[in-house]
Amino acid sequence: MVSEQAIKDMVQQIIQQLSMDNQQVAEEQDLQNADTKVETEVPLDNTELKDLTEIKMQDYFAVPDPANKEVYLGLKESTPARVGIWRAGPRYRTETLLRFRADHAVAMDAVFTYVSEEFLEEMELFSVSTLCRDKDEYVTRPDLGRKFSEEAIATIKERCVKNPQVQIYVSDGLSSTAIEANVKDILPSIMQGLENYGLKAGTPFFVKHGRVPAMDVVSEALDAQVTIVLIGERPGLATGESMSCYMAYRAKVGMPESRRTVISNIHKGGTSATEAGAHIAHIIKEMIEQKASGLDLKL
Ligand code: B12
């Protein structure tokens, strides 16, 4: 028969053992946390991280032992499409997948970031917004991106020259990146071209959360002959920097799209901003001479 004292001692021993075990677990946990902390505190040396998007897709070639590498590379020159990227079994290689995700991130940033205040200040563009309150609304309600509040219209009327021959404005559209990448070069190029043709431009400004047909409202508010908007294009996976110029003669709200002319793919890998600027100035001159735009314009 075990004595009462012996049972008490046994229980005491077990409790002591348990508390020792708990302490050990806690200590191990602390140690592990400390390890993780040390790891996260190690400063990242960014110079060692490779930016996958820096390599041009045309230059990226991963096919081992190609039958005719020269011809393959020649074909690749004509497209930024992901060809010649090879595979791991039936799957993408890790690098290909990471590159895809990096390019997708560039596109998302282009849509969801804003043109910076500093940029607008530098370009001396005052800013008005359409009826969209944020990017989510902009993406889901294209109709609101074509309309302005009465206050916004009043600001446009108050700050801009009336009845301009040419009204130019800039809008983020679907890529703020495109605006920051191209406007600095294209605006002076268009202005210079217009000056050479003896044409006068009104007061340029910026429209936040803009869709293309917002230009019809601007045209009516200012009674412009030609209205043009430099607007960020929906980005793909090849570049987030592509901008378009949509133009119309005597644009009216509700007019058919066929009255618009568009110059698209303005970016350093497409039509360069300065080249596009000269081309746009020429088209504006033709619009004013022919009193027409879109399908009615003969170029
Ligand atoms: C999305 C898109 C469309 C969508 C537009 C729907 C929408 N609500 O967004 C759909 C599928 C309807 C479309 C149709 C057409 N499109 Co489109 N489209 C594009 C794309 C991929 C992006 C446009 C963009 O980002 N716009 C900016 C945002 C902010 O504008 P938004 O206000 O949201 O949308 C307006 C514009 O996109 C505009 N629009 C779209 N395409 C076109 C084409 C022309 C000629 C005009 C005047 C306007 C226009 O219409 C939208 C509604 O108002 C571009 C590619 C590119 N690199 O730009 C081609 C592009 C602009 N389209 C093109 C063409 C040819 C057409 C069509 C004529 C095709 C056809 N044969 O039917 C039609 C014309 C439609 C029209 N509005 O008159 C060409 C224009 C080539 C050129 N320089 O003349 C482009 C550059 C594609 C290409 N590389 O060939 N398009």
Image (tube, helix red, strand yellow):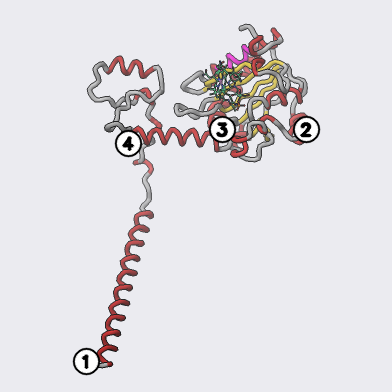
* Relative horizontal placement of residue 3, taking residue 143 as reference (left or right): left
Q: Secondary structure at mark 3?
A: helix
* Visible residue check, residue 200: no
C-beta proximity under 8 Å, tags 2 and 4: no
Q: Along the polypeptide, which appears first: circle 4 or circle 3? A: 4
Amino acid found under the numbered disc labelled 2: Ala
Q: Is residue 278 magenta?
A: yes
**Quadrant, the C terminus:** top right
* Relative horizontal placement of residue 17, taking residue 207 as reference (left or right): left
Residue at image mark 2:
154
Q: Give neighbour class at mark 2: few <14, some 14-19, many 20+ (Cα, 10 Å).
A: few
Q: Residue furthest front?
A: 1
User: How far is the residue under mark 4 from the one under mark 3?
Assistant: 30 Å
User: How far is the residue under mark 4 from the one under mark 1?
Assistant: 70 Å
Amino acid found under the numbered disc labelled 1: Met
Q: Which SS type dominates the magenta stretch?
A: helix
Q: How many marks?
A: 4
Rendered location of residue 114, percent (x, y): 58, 37
Amino acid found under the numbered disc labelled 4: Thr
Residue at image mark 3:
176
Q: Where ligand 1 lies, by quadrant?
A: top right
**Quadrant, the N terminus:** bottom left
User: How far is the residue under mark 2 from the one under mark 3?
Assistant: 25 Å
* Visible residue check, residue 15: yes
* Residue depth check, mark 3 versus mark 1: number of the one nearer the observer: 1
